Amino acid sequence: MQPFTLVGALLFLLHISFSSTETHRHYRQVPTGNQAGVCRYGRRLECCYGWKKNSKGQCEAQCDHGCKHGECVGPNKCKCFPGYTGKTCNQDLNECGLKPRPCEHRCMNSHGSYKCYCLNGYTLMPDGSCANSRTCSLAHCQYGCENFEGEIRCLCPSAGLQLGQDERTCVDIDECVTGKNLCPYNKQCVNTFGSYFCKCQDGYDLKYVDGKYDCVDLDECASGTHKCSHLAVCLNTPGSYKCRCKFGFRGNGFECSAIPDSQVRPKQETEDIRNVIPEPVVTPPPKIRQQPFDYEGEVYIGPQTEGRKEEEFPEEEEEEEEVEDNQLNPRGDVFISEDFESVFGPATEVKEIELAPVQEEFIMDCNFDQGACEWVQDKDDDMDWSVAYHNEGAGAEYYMTMSGLIGEQDDVAKLKLLLSDRTQQGSFCLTFDYRVAGHNVGTLRVLLDNIAYPVWEQSQSRDQGWQTELLTVTWKEVAPESIVFEAQRGKGVGGEIGLDNVVLTSGPCQEDVSPFF
């Protein structure tokens, strides 16, 4: 009996173990390995946690914050495209800062990519290295050259640059004007040196919607950013808004004033009398005395007509009524006959005085990232300003610079800020950040197109760091049409002259005491 009892106990334990294993398999998530994102739940195949079945029946990974320049390969896991980094692939990867560097001599970073170029006398090789070339040194190229089928050609470090007429220097291609940009219909193109970027039209905001970034209409009425009067109603429109004065008020919506009670009628009453012609009413003749004094006795005697005494000595009650009538009439209208000559001499000629219009208050942000101003590279200078990125801070914020490694001594680069009609109404404050870093790197000047001499000049900055300058711009007769930032190369090698955060504000500067005319 004992052997059979032992065998039965073993069979019973095996049965319990098999049952628990089946139960565990029924609730356990087991990846199949045949398809990404598919797990086995017992005998069923379903999408794993963090995956969702698409319209084709396949399991796709879900990334809650999206992947701007990449693809979602796992739950909240992005695989960035080359040239981008970050958790959501929304940051530019500065390849020029990697170790080892991808370029042997010089490296220029761009949004999502980079470009290598060599010093004069060297040729760029396919792997980013630079080979010595005697013939290339004779070309005097601005950004290096290459040997193509035995012919030496100068290179430009970006697709947004092209060789100038001298076949040595590179000039900017305005993709926004030539139509080579890829901005969608609801975004506007902003040109930069060697490239461009797309930003939302005015009245739109960039938001993450339905798995992608898109420009969405900004409801100024709901957000309270409109400038309608508190006596008006704000009506939102695609990309903008409208203001309409409330009932009982009139104006353009931004400024509303009350309509007198005599002119305000209910809508139903207005519709009823819209086509009614009022009957003519005879205007009574004025009862104003024609002559206040006689010149001999200096006492009013009035016309020699009957009933004169009644007019000369009215009753007290009538005088009180006339006083009350005068108090109720705030206009104080007086009728004067054409034959009347004032006792103080002939009438004085009435002259119209023209008052100067009140200057509109404004603050215009002209920064190079998403500013609202128009910048133009001068075509008559020796070289152009280039783009550089700030080291600190998230995002791809950049500024304009003239590098001390480019060009020759006394070469000039001019960057023009075109002024709008609002800025030409009166004086305004020009605020900007500048940096002159490096020994004898050069000089930064600020000029106005209607003045022959610079209004501001600086050859160095404190501790070679960024500084803020405020200048009051005013004029006497002709308003300037543009502000010119001119950078001139010095004899030093290295360093840079930088410009950023340009802002125009109506009125004189608060901290500036030396306006320029």
Image: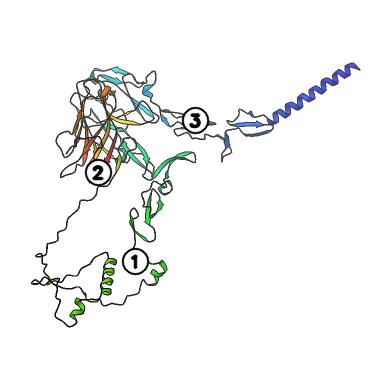
Q: Which amino acid, by three-letter code, is at mark 2?
A: Thr
Residue 41, disc: none
Q: Is residue 276 above or below residue 173?
A: below
Q: Residue at x 20, y 68 (%)?
A: 334
**Label 3 environment density (alpha carbons within 10 Å; few <14, some 14–19, many ≥20):** many
Q: How far across and how far down the image is residue 323, in percent?
A: 26, 69
Q: Secondary structure at mark 1?
A: helix
Disc 1 from disc 2: Cα separation: 39 Å
- Quick check: 293 above or below 465? below
Give the residue at mark 1.
263
Q: Is residue 120 left or right of residue 52?
A: left
Q: Residues within 10 Å of mark 2 (few under 14, many from 20)?
A: many
Q: Residue at x 27, y 33 (%)?
A: 432
Rendered location of residue 428, percent (x, y): 24, 41
Q: Nearer the viewer, mark 1 or mark 2?
A: 1
Residue tagged by mark 2? 423
Please name which of the two marks, 1 or 3, marks the residue nearer to the observer: 1
Query: Where is mark 3, residue-wise?
Result: 78
